[in-house]
Amino acid sequence: MSRPPAGLASFLQPLQLSEATVYDLAYRWSTAYRSLFHESSAQFLPTPITSLPTGHETGRYLAVYVGVSYLRIAFIELSGTEQTKGRGSPSSSSSSSSSSSSSPLSRLRAGCGPRVKRTLEKAWSIDTELKQGHPEDLFMWIGDRIADVVSDSVRPLRAEDWPAEVVMGISFCFPLMQNSPDEAILAPTGKGFTLSSNLNLRQALLDGYERHTRRETDDDGGDDDDSSSGGGGGGGGDDQAPKNETQLPPLRITAMANDTVAIFLSLAYSISALPNSRVVMGLMVGGGCNASVHMRISDLHRAKVKHILAQNPAATHVLVSTEWSLADSTPPLRDLRLVTKWDALLDARSARPGFQTFEYMVAGHYLGELVRLITYDYFVNVLGVAREEMPSVLLEEHALTTEFLSVVVAPVRADAELTAALEREIPSPASSRRRSFWTPAHSNALRTIAHVVQIRSAALVAAATVGLLAATQEIRLSPPAESSSSENHFQPGEPAPLVSDTTWRQGPEELVVAFCGGVIQHYPGYKETVQRYLDRLILRGPQHGGQSIFMREASDGGIVGVGVLAGTVEGRIEGIVGSTLTRFMK
């Protein structure tokens, strides 16, 4: 790969963050978050979950995940830890196994823990018409898709073997307000769904599925399907409601959660039996960005937790959905002048300017557009390229996607190879006087800009993670003036010291961040960059006792975790009736 074009490095200087700046941001966020624990009614929303999975939960549960762009449904089978004693076994997010002689650290990274199995899994894309149409149509469509999977489950069984009911959990990509695990009200959201904030999600789901619990007759079986099945079946499977000759078992919704809470629970279940490791945070970096954290109830304003303490006065900790990208978290970014002119332009053109500035700087729904804005500015105002010479992808809003950058631009090292790929995928306009817009220099510029934007995104996510864990007192941060490290820009390829197996076995605790999402899982080098920033930042703390933060993938955590929550609420802990999780009832 050749050197970046002349002048590009100085042009991109506003995006470059020194390690000291990232640390300063983490420290400022830790202070801001502590204030928001008490002051914000839109952020740091406590869930009704006051105890974590033990790893012994068992049972079979229907799990549903409503994401930003897709719907996924599967049956989750929890086998507990009994089958894994004395031997390694795959967890829900890893197919690796380890021997009983492995060190604790290697066992953690290999995914040893309770067994989780997904069966009858299906996925569908959610069309914009459904997201922005009537809520009844969306939930009727979701009910039809649930019926697809339930029908597949009971079809091979004799009628007398059908379950009396199907126990179900569901997670959502948007923020929720909850008084009990099986009820949820939608909080104000910018996820693209036109759902009212007073919508009772549980009842809407039951209403959407209800028609599948009664026998279909000639009088009521025809028109309903055409009017309610909607679109959005692009993920595979029939869009029409299933034609059930007999009624399906009714649903019993026992667990509802935000997706980051489900991610947390998914990994907490999988590694619960491992020593010296503890899941402290769930992290989603996909189309959007959010986190969940396990924190002391006493750190939250009493008004936020009054209903929890009324039901369980002995509770000391609670899982919290942070909604950390909302406006009240923005001041540290602005105080350090990290919001560039390109960020401000993207923000101004968004549906809700100023609503989620942090998310606009880090999340997959926006990174492609941010790269496009910067690239356009560089080509036009630095290189003097005429608009009519540029491919339409660089001219049209949101035409350049993060997925394209991840798949086509980021993995390619050779300029000639990238140039050929870009000319093939986003060719020069037919009216251009150039033989090809994509010269090696132009291709290199696009790749460099995308790389710098990705590095900054990872740095900001790491800073937010460290700031959050400091705010919840899982780690400590010294004031920036007291921390010590070089002022040089952090090089993502530069390794940071890691905790050794020997040191770890002697007692230092490993704080585990469960992560999921298209950007952090699939963008080349992203999760490794976040981890390296975490390593450097926590060393600057410094930490007493050698604590470390380890990121661990919770693949499909949004759907697996809500199955775990359903199992926890049900209290099926290897034959023991009752769970450590109190089931709050209104």
Image (tube, helix red, strand yellow):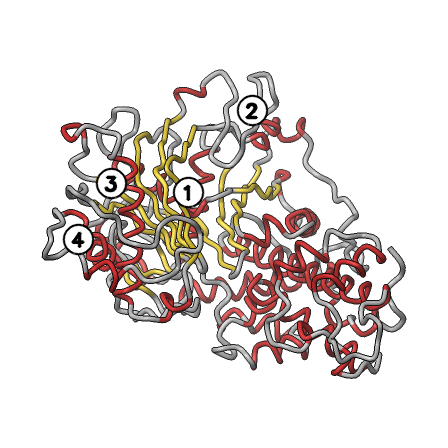
Q: Which residue is mark 3?
A: 167
N-terminal of the pair, mark 2 or mark 3, is: 2
- Whole-angstrom CA distance, mark 2 to mark 1, is 21 Å
Q: Which residue is mark 4?
A: 211
Picture coordinates of residue 124, whole percent (x, y): 41, 52
Q: What residue lies at 55% left-to-right and 65% top-to-bottom? A: 365
Q: Amino acid at mark 1?
A: Leu
Picture coordinates of residue 420, whole percent (x, y): 79, 59
Quick one: 575 or 124, which is closer to the camera? 124
Q: Is residue 234 visible?
A: yes
Q: What residue lies at 74% left-to-right and 63% top-to-bottom? A: 452
Q: Is residue 295 visible?
A: no
- Whole-angstrom CA distance, mark 2 to mark 3, is 30 Å
Q: Amino acid at mark 3?
A: Val
Disc 2, disc 1: CB below 8 Å?
Answer: no
N-terminal of the pair, mark 3 or mark 4, is: 3
Mark 2 neighbour class, 10 Å CA radius: few under 14, some 14 to 19, many 20 or more: some
Q: Which residue is mark 2?
A: 97
- Whole-angstrom CA distance, mark 4 to mark 1, is 32 Å
Observer-side mark, 1 or 3, equals 3
- Whole-angstrom CA distance, mark 2 to mark 4, is 44 Å
Disc 3, disc 4: CB below 8 Å?
Answer: no
N-terminal of the pair, mark 2 or mark 4, is: 2
Q: Which mark is residue 265?
A: 1
Q: What residue lies at 27% left-to-right and 44% top-to-bottom? A: 168
Q: Amino acid at mark 2?
A: Ser
